[in-house]
Image (cartoon, grey):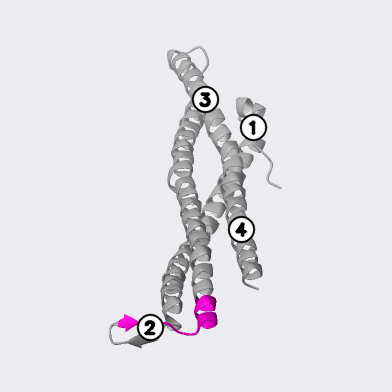
Amino acid sequence: MEQPIKLDEALDDSPIFREELRVSEDCVDDIVDKFKKFLKVCKHWQEAGREFGECNVQLSEDSSLVALPKKGSERISSDETLEYGLQTFSKFLKELQTIRERMVSQMSDFIASFEKFINTDVKDVKELSKKYYRSTNLHDTTLNKLSKVKKNSTKFNELEQELLETKKQHRLNSLEFACKLNEMQTRKKLALLENMCTFMNSQLEYFNQGHSFCKDME
């Protein structure tokens, strides 16, 4: 299981902390790639569901007319048993379609949640990543310059003060970046599990209601 980044390591900017950031950032990139592939399947399912729904509506409408022979422009009465059966079947399809439409609608929410995660939450992480690595490079460069200057010189004092400022900013960016990565670990689980549970419940409702309708038709 992926572990959260230890924030106390950010103050020391230890090699362990930098490695944890790198690993966590790689995990975000990996989950984004997987979510994008998953989204394609969800959208395909959604489109297939809509097409199936259109066919189901047409079948419902046509089945209610099958038992009524047509004479000229008018429908005439037919076998009452057959007519009742087909009318009941038509009603059954319509009621199931209502639940199916709700499932398709929930898939839209499902897709929107993943797209928000990719387009907004991950984008925020990338922006913080840029800030972090810029401040890291600036801090390391300033530290390197300071190591090459004689102590107690004017240049040394200037660089020492600059290093303090860059270190302060670097710590702030490190903490902000680490907090966001930890937040993303939680968000990716919620984005997946909450929507999965909602969709599974709608599937359960669909099949349970279908079974109930079939029992009523017996």
The CA distance from mark 2 to mark 1 is: 86 Å
Mark 3 surroundings within 10 Å by alpha-carbon count, few (fewer than 14), some (14 through 19), many (20 or more): some
Q: Earlier in the sequence, mark 3 or mark 2?
A: 2
Outermost residue, right side: 1
81 falls in the magenta region: yes
Q: Earlier in the sequence, mark 2 or mark 1?
A: 1
The correct choice, above or below, for 16 with respect to 143 in the image is below
Say which element carries label 3: helix
List the residue tagged with mark 1. 14
The correct choice, above or below, for 179 with respect to 59 in the image is above
Report which quarter residue 202 is drawn in: bottom right
Q: Dots 3 and 1: beta carbons under 8 Å?
A: no
The CA distance from mark 3 to mark 2 is: 81 Å
The CA distance from mark 1 to mark 4 is: 52 Å
- In depth, the one of 28 and 89 nearer the eye is 89
Q: Amino acid at mark 4?
A: Glu
The CA distance from mark 3 to mark 4 is: 49 Å
Say which element carries label 2: loop
Residue 205 is tagged as: 4
Say which element carries label 1: loop
Q: Earlier in the sequence, mark 1 or mark 4?
A: 1
The correct choice, above or below, for 67 with respect to 48 in the image is below
Which of labels 2 and 1 is toward the front?
2
The CA distance from mark 2 to mark 4 is: 38 Å
Q: Which residues are magenta?
A: 74-86
Which of labels 1 and 4 is toward the front?
4
Residue 35 is tagged as: none
Q: Dots 3 and 2: beta carbons under 8 Å?
A: no
